[in-house]
Amino acid sequence: MMKAIAAGAAGVFTSAYYMGTEPSAASSSVQCAKVMPEPPLSPSEFRPFQLINVYDESPDTKVFRFAFPDGNQDLNMQLCSCVAFRFTDKDGNEVIRPYTPISRHDQKGYFEFCIKNYKDSKMGSHLWALKIGQTIDIKGPFVKWNYKPGQYKTFGFIAGGTGITPMFQFLRQLVKDKTEPEISLIYANRRKEDVLLGYELNTLMKQYRNFSPYYLLSDPPASWMGGIGHVSKEMLKAFMPPPSRKDGMLFVCGPPKFMEHVCGDKNFATQPPSQGDLK
């Protein structure tokens, strides 16, 4: 039976049994007597990154762009990896949260994050108050799943809300790799204005004929032409690769209630904890 690769609401890929983090190798290299720029990130220490741009993606979600120290640096990050943000609150306590970049891995000079300001979120409130020119400490990358091009012929993605962010990183690379897998996406939100990265997803669909996104709203406008309601067994059968396929992989990411609805209860008795087969 096909298992889901699950993730939390912050947008971090973890396996169905919640793998621990694995720091990626990060070292400079010399080719043809030319020294390549050092990777901007380190998995062993937090480094400050300056905010250079921010724009609205939805009523409660923004895209934050942070500059690399060297304009010739790129992200140099393996797919299905996350980073950790850190700041110190007014009481002197460290607040650390994981996020997934949405910018291309070969983007030079900066990286971007699509982040929602959840109610009572200390990190969200801090980022919303951050001004251009100020910095946030970032550490990473941390690999959550080792992707090998051509390993699978079909991929299914089930996302709720901000759960689309780690999937978008992966989707864009699948299209770029030109291994031509079949890619299906169910993307669930409450309202149309809650849909994140809609323009970018539609652009991928136009570029890649094997990518089929299905947008689902639980509170749609009268003019809505997509799916209505919540993720159901019928939708999974219609849009996701069947469990019988041995050459397929399924990913699920979203807020805790979404994960419970799609994947079932998390079993903390196992080590690491598991969140079993899809319902």
Image: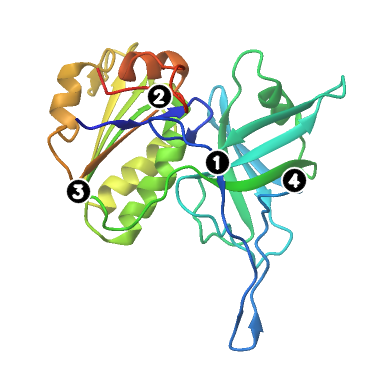
Task: State the SS at label 1.
Answer: loop
**Horizontal side of residue 80 vs 261, given as left or right:** right
Three-letter amino acid code of the residue under disc 1: Thr
Q: Which mark is residue 274?
A: 2
The span from disc 2 to disc 3 (Cα, nearest Å) is 31 Å
Instruction: Give the crowd class for mark 2: few <14, some 14-19, many >=20 residues within 10 Å.
Output: some
Q: Is residue 240 above or below residue 70?
A: above
Q: Which image quarter is the N terminus in?
A: top left
Say which of marks 3 and 1 sits in front.
1
User: Judging from the image, what secondary structure is the residue with disc 3 in?
Assistant: loop
Q: Quadrant of residue 14?
A: top left
> Rounded to the nearest whole Å, what is the CA distance between mark 2 and mark 1?
15 Å
Disc 2 element: loop
- Give percent across and percent down for residue 70: 71, 64
| Rendered location of residue 220, percent (x, y) | 32, 14
Q: Which residue position is annotated with label 4?
A: 46
The local crowd at label 3, few if under 14, some if 14 to 19, many if 20 or more residues have their Cα within 10 Å, is some
Q: Earlier in the sequence, mark 4 or mark 3?
A: 4
Give amino acid for label 3: Asn
Q: Which residue is mark 1?
A: 21
What residue is shown with label 3?
A: 210
Which secondary structure, mark 4?
loop
Mark 1 and mark 4 in contact? Answer it, CB < 8 Å.
no
Residue type at the position of mark 4:
Phe
- Marked residue nearer the N-terminal end (2 or 3): 3
Mark 2 to mark 4: distance in Å? 29 Å
Disc with the residue nearer the chain's start (2 vs 1): 1
Left or right of 8? Residue 122 is right
Image coords of residue 222 (percent x, y): 28, 13
Q: In which quadrant of the rendered view does residue 75 lie? A: bottom right
